[in-house]
Image (cartoon, rainbow, N blue to C red):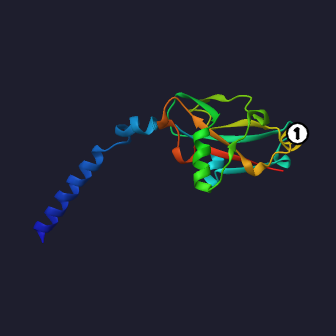
Amino acid sequence: MKMTRIIFCAVAAVCMSVLAGCSKQQYRLYEDNIESKVYFVQAATDPVLTVSADDLDGSGYVNLCIYNAGNNSDNITVRVEADENACRIYNIEQDMDCQVLPQEYWSLPQPEIVMDTQENNQVYMPLELKIDSFRADGLDPDDYVLPLTLFTGSTRNVTFDYKTVYVRLAL
């Protein structure tokens, strides 16, 4: 019985010394430098964003929320572009034959944003949609999609599954 107690105390002392040797400070580099991962908040719930004239603000804009996850302290430059490759993927996945919405019906006033990853975890990017012009030209909204994709200096800074949002017009 006494021997069991001595062995138990010895094992407990070894475990305590091992645990005491682990500190948060050891892992500080990891904790403070988690890579930034940017993504469209909309794409996390549904990558297809259907926009009607009622969804636009008074100036004809809809705001797309871009979020940054991670703990690093550097700035990250985020660029948003129409992506023809994403349109091809969309057509395959949805069994459709859509074209990219022509540039004359949309614009990004500020297609590139520098995010301060330490202070600002999200930004809103305004997207201007000229739905009235689209409607006046008699185009069918089912024939078009606007795939907007996030790009950064490195693919490791983009959350792959949520990097593209597909904007569809509803008349």
Q: What residue type is labelled 1?
A: Gly
Quadrant occupied by the N terminus: bottom left
Q: Which of 135 and 53 is in front in this view?
A: 135
SS category of the residue bearing label 1: loop
Query: What residue lies at 84% left-to-right and 50% top-to-bottom?
Result: 171
The image quarter in which residue 95 lies: bottom right
Query: What residue lies at 43% left-to-right and 39% top-to-bottom?
Result: 31
Q: Which of 31 and 125 is in front in this view?
A: 125
Asked if residue 87 lies left or right of residue 56, the reply is: left
Residue 164 at x, y percent in the picture: 61, 43
Q: Nearer the viewer, residue 140 or 46?
A: 140
Residue at the extreme bottom = 1
Residue 126 at x, y percent in the picture: 74, 36
The image quarter in which residue 59 lies: top right
Q: Nearer the viewer, residue 163 or 73?
A: 163
Residue 41 at x, y percent in the picture: 64, 46
The crowding category of the residue bearing disc 1, from other C-alpha atoms within 10 Å (few below 14, some 14 to 19, many at least 20), is few
Query: What residue lies at 59% left-to-right and 43% top-to-bottom?
Result: 86
Query: What residue lies at 25% left-to-right and 49% top-to-bottom?
Result: 18
Count the marks.
Answer: 1
Tell me: residue 163, above or below residue 80. below
Which residue is denoted by mark 1 in the rendering?
A: 58
Residue at the extreme left = 3
Residue 42 at x, y percent in the picture: 66, 48
